[in-house]
Amino acid sequence: MNENGRSKLGRNLLLVGRIALGVIFLIAAYQKMKPQGGMSWGLASIKTSLALFAMGVDSYQMLPPWAVSPLAHFIPPFELFLGLWLLSGIALRLSSLISTLAIGVFITAMFSAYERGLTISCGCFGPGEHVGPLTLMRDSLLFLPLALALTIGSFWIRRKPRESAAPETVAPTPRTN
Amino acid sequence: MRRKTCGTLGAAAEFLAIALLALGLARPAFPQANAAAPKTSPTASNHLRTTGTTTSTVSPAFGPPVKTYGSKNAPITMEVFTDYQCPSCRNLFEQTLRPLINEYVASGKVYLIHHDFPLPMHRYGYEAARWANAAARVGQFGNVEAALYDHQDAWGADGNIAKYVEDAVPAADFKRIEKLMQGCEDRSTPTSAAQGPGCALDSYIEQDRAIGLQIPVQSTPTYVISRKGQKLPAGTGVVSWPILKQFFDSLLSS
């Protein structure tokens, strides 16, 4: 495969990767903010869902109460923004790097809770999912490598110069394999 | 005349004797409907609990255990599944449930229901639940629950739960609790048919566990919050009172 082929493959993989990671973040944000307990969509239901997520964050017992609520109200909208950012492909190096750091922080918190023997809800995709071997494996062997690969790939693949609107007639250059 | 009288009396006596004899012979054939049935007080219900193939009768003088705080009409209901020997459950009780009871339960905002969910790894957890249920049947659940959590480390080390229950309730109530604990000397999990009549209080604990398994409760503490009949996803672990209070406030304002 020549350099052009490798570059094209790399770009396609980057595309798939950022779409996959973007969708993961969007699903995570949706699960945390969707109405609970039979409520309908609205500001009040989102506020309640975020308050419920705050209880999940608090159960990690890593932060004082005054810090839990602001963080719990920040994470879901941040995930929503991150998901959309990844899907857009704009500044992919930066978005993928931030995604990797975010997932790294989440996994660290989960391992900390597991190591302390806390049987709590992960909070990764809303309530109901416990911190345990399965969630730890999923996040550290699937999500984190995906984000890392995306980050490394985005820095590795160099953009080609953009072609101009009017095609120029250029003499073909001899190819070297 | 005398002969007639005697004759008449004789016939009557014979008849009476035959009747008495007939009744004496026939009595075992009739079921003794109320002979073994315990008396029922007008305010309590009589329970028959079956443990394996034997039946134990719960004392009829006390009603079922009341392990709730507050009014059923409160807009929010919180059900908590705990093990008295679970350290996290103790933390939840001390840090969160106590202020919840003092503030939001007292003001009618929250109805708090306790369910027992003793875990196998806690040696005295099941026995502690028995004591709590016995106390709940005499109206002393709150005091005993607090005592169990306050002295968890102590009785968790040697299993001497009775001492702390006795200190938490009036003497007369402790005697009633002790009476309810008769048959519960086996400290293990629910007695099987092979072990004998068993502990009558186990049925209440098993009822709570059955409710928990439907959720399902996978660890303690686990809590389920409901509003207007709608149950929210179950939460696990310790949540601090300020955070829980914020959540209740958002529910009440929505």
Image (tube, coloured by chain):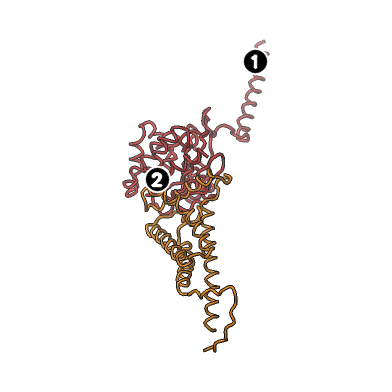
Chain colours: A orange, B red
Q: Position of residue A141 (x, y in %)?
A: 47, 68
Q: Residue furthest top?
A: B1
**Between B147 and A173, which is closer to the camera in this rendering?**
A173
Position above or below: B42 against B122: above
**Mark in front: 1 vs 2:** 2
Residue placed at 55% from the left, 87% from the top? A173
Residue placed at 58% from the left, 45% from the top? A40
Query: For residue A169, which numbered disc appears in the image?
Result: none
Residue at numbered disc 1 = B6
Give the mark, 1 or 2, whose residue is nearer the N terminus. Answer: 1
Residue at numbered disc 2 = B240
Which subunit holds the residue at mark 1? B
Q: Position of residue B151 (x, y in %)?
A: 33, 43
Which subunit holds the residue at mark 2? B
- Labels 1 and 2 positioned on one and the same chain: yes
Position above or below: A170 against A48: below
Amino acid type, callout 1: Cys
Q: Secondary structure at mark 1?
A: helix
Side (left or right) of A117 relative to B3: left
